[in-house]
Image (cartoon, helix red, strand yellow):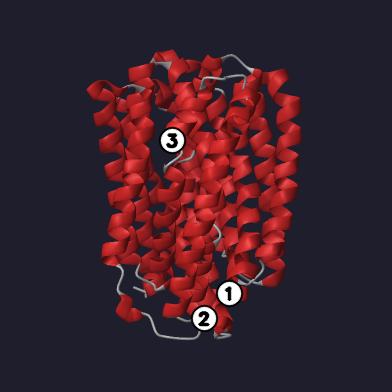
Amino acid sequence: MSSFTRGAFQLMAAQTVFMLSGYALNVFLARHFGPELYGVYGVVMAVLVWAEIFVINGIPTAMQKFLAESPSAALFRLGRRMQFGYTLVILLLFAALTPAISAWLHEPDFKKFLWIAAPDILLYGLYWFYLGAHNGLHRFDSQALIVIFYGLSKVASSIGLVLAGVGIAGAFIGNFLGSAVGLAIGLWRLNRASLVETTVSEHYSRLTKFAAPIILYSLSLNAVFYLDLLFVKRFLPPVVAGYYTAAATIARVPYFIFLGLGFSILPVLSRALAQQNVAETRRLLRQTMRLLFVLLAPVLALVIPNAGSIIAFLYTDAYQPATPILPLLIISIVLYTFWMVFSTIMSAASKPDRAFQLSLVAAVADVILCWILVPRWEGRGAALATLGASACGMLMTGTYVLRRFEFIIPWRSLWRAIIAGAAAWAVSMWWTTAGVMLLVELIVLFGFYLVLLYILGELKDIRKIFV
């Protein structure tokens, strides 16, 4: 098995554990608090996460790229100092702007929840720095362990505090306790022996020139991920935010899993490009596209026909108004996942500035679409806005990557995934279940999809990835 593939699957497995633990937390909170208060949790977390985008995608991403090219101890120390100082500034700015954010959302009481949640900005920023350092050093096993401990400690502490009577504030406290545990594991697992001494002077300009557009790109990319919910909260009744949060939490599964693929491709592709290894670069990109096609097709085939049953099973019938929102969001997230991977490829090719420019266009389109569609079509309007912006971002970044790197699309894999996915979709439309039997249906249909891929020859071909 190649180091890239092994690392990709380690990180995707870790992201799966993280995603499942996050689901457990969201389902618990949704059932415990009900749609309206669960909507408060979703909106506060959306605001917090958007603020944290400033601190998780600049210096940490630079560590992924530059430590992969040269494992410099001086670079690591400089990046750590820059990350701590910068993250502290963002935390203070967030605390100062909290009253204005609450006023824009027409919820003055939100400021106390935002202040409670705010310490996570510092802890999460440092957690991501060490995550990026492990990734840049190709320590994918350590990175996977950090992600798993972070996810499990977050859900355990949050649920424990809520059950102890702390209320919704307990969920926010548990969130930053999870970041603290992840940071501690990152510190413990770092092997300084893998770093080599170099001079500091050559690194500062490289970090700042790369990190600044990465931060801006991440802000615009993630704006599409979270702005829809903020517009829902601003224009619609509070309970609608709860329905939308439920649908969005389900729809985001592919993205969080495929973050592992993005984590693995950035340092590996950066090294291949730095070494001007054209054959290895093409092989990595074709592997990446094949994994996306084969693993995202069943997401569409299984979730869309069963949207209502999935929502009822996870959140109870009280959340059924989220049913028409989920199919639109799941399509959006599939497109968004391609967009994220294409942008990561552009960053590995030292084009984070171009990734930012294209993502900014999509983010502006999202704001315009949300402003027009949310008051008119409510939750479905927000989902349509996200769908339009995600399609825009995917098409623009995909066009750039395909022009920059030719012959990276494995067309046979794409058509096989489409054929097998369409067949699974057709069976899913005919076979409708609910409750526990829904899990049986989804497992059987996924197995049916894999059997079709085997018959079509895709699983035979895909084994080449592991060589």
Secondary structure of the residue carrying numbered label 2: loop
How far, Cα to Cα, is label 2 from label 3?
A: 35 Å
Residue 140 vertical position relative to residue 393 in the rendered view, above or below:
below
Q: In the picture, which quadrant includes the C terminus?
A: bottom left
The amino acid type, in three-letter code, at marker 2 is Val
Q: Say whether residue 177 is left or right of residue 426.
A: left
Number of numbered discs present?
Answer: 3
Q: Residue at x 47, y 26 (%)?
A: 112
- Residue 276, placed above or below residue 29: below
- Image quarter where the N terminus lies is bottom left
Q: Nearer the viewer, residue 186 or 305?
A: 186
Mark 3 packing: few (<14 Cα in 10 Å), some, or many (20+)?
many
Labelled disc at residue 117: 3
Do the CB atoms of the residues marked 2 and 3 lie less than 8 Å apart? Answer: no
Whether residue 163 appears in this view of the structure is yes
Locate residue 41, reporting x and y percent: 45, 27
Q: Which mark is residue 204?
A: 1
Label ID, residue 85: none
Residue type at the position of mark 3: Ala
Q: CA distance from mark 1 to mark 3?
A: 32 Å
